[in-house]
Amino acid sequence: MESVLTLIFAGGIFRASRPLTEAQPDAGYSRSVSDTPAEDAPGRNMPRVQTARTTDGVSIAYASTGDGPPLVLMPSLPLGNFVGEWQVPVHRDAYQRIADDLRLIQYDSRGSGHSQRDVSNITPEAMLRDLDAVADAAGVERFALFGMYLASTYAISYTLAHPERVSHMVLFGGSARGWDAMGARQTQALLSLIEQDWDTFVTSAIHTWMGWSAGEAGRLETEAARDATTPLITRAMLQATSGLDFTDQLSSITVPVLVFHQRGVQQIPIETSRALAESFPNGRLCVLEGSAASLFVEDFDSVLRELHAFLGISSSVADTSGRPRHAAEWPMPRALTTRELDVLRLLAQGETNAEIARRLGISVHTVERHVANLYRKIDARGRADATAFAVRRGIA
């Protein structure tokens, strides 16, 4: 029987230089599909929310849109909330266009979204049961599987466990090792905000992911993500995922694999995406022009054409050569000095004033002076604001 591990509440848990090892489910927070009505009537603008039940008795919310070959889109871990995502125009448009030619199946993982919140097991093995239950409830025996960022690792895990059910695998922004998707300095800076300020973490994560020019779409996405789960569940999911490593098993996955990469994205280096694609016997890397950390924000026509070609279906998407939109550049307020930038960068990575002083070879008093100056210049109230500022401007 799988054991439930105790979560260690240590400050700065995501500053570790290696994968984390312990996870603990949320407790004392209950919300399930049965008592969570859909916000809109089902239809073209809002699919009908249905319920699947896992072998360990957890209720999983899912929806099915379209009538073509089945494509299962795994939830955006740890902030998945597909009902909320359908309220965001850029996502709704993408999902509707996918469903024009495919049967799009979406779901929320246990502990998040409209799925059951009061769960006692959120281990990686349990998370795969969610997908099994959804596929069974939707009546699909074999399907294409699409995972982005942390969900990529779970897509790989599921395909290894159930090769007979997966016809194709599509990945974006992920890795065979969970830690690779979280190890970048910018991502680590974001993760440190979970401990400091949940609202700032969610806002920074979503806008960094969608691009800071997202405007109203970014606000709607932030609302959906803020309600998706809790800080405790988020920490536990990230801890569980950080220890996964399927690097040595990729050569045994023989299904066709398409790995998307946005050329200008900072979260995942192109070398990581290339190495991932080359590790599969039938893997292919598709590099797209763009800088947003989401496939839905910029040139979705190109994404859809590549997806259709990979799945072997005819595409009605016109092949245009229009330039993709790029996230707006945020101007720096009052100019920060080189030393202030150094301090801000280390501060955003979670280092204390004493650690920054040792790293830079200056006194703690000097660090405190630089911190006070840069707080004033960027209008930050504390470390959480400064970290969010650094993430937004690519300083972290």
Image: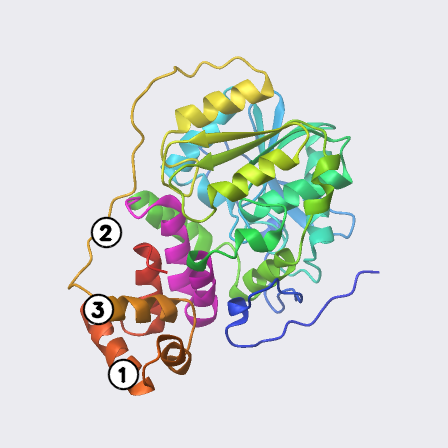
Q: Do the residues labelled 1 and 2 touch (CB within 8 Å)?
A: no
Q: In this view, does 156 lie above or below 19?
A: above
Q: Depth check: 61 or 288 in front?
A: 288
Residue 49 at least partly seen: no
Q: Of the two numbered discs 3 and 1 on the same chain, state the one appearing first in sequence.
A: 1
- Amino acid type at mark 3: Asp
Residue 239 lies in quadrant: bottom right
Q: Of the two numbered discs 2 and 3 on the same chain, state the one appearing first in sequence.
A: 2
Residue matched to label 2: 330
- Amino acid type at mark 1: Thr
Residue matched to label 3: 379
Dominant secondary structure of the residues highlighted in magenta in the image: helix
Provide the residue span drawn in magenta: 187-215
Q: What element carries label 3?
A: loop
Residue matched to label 1: 366
Instruction: Name the spot of residue 316 as percent of width and height, x first.
Output: 45, 13
**Colour mapping:** rainbow
In the image, residue 13 lies in the stretch drawn in magenta = no
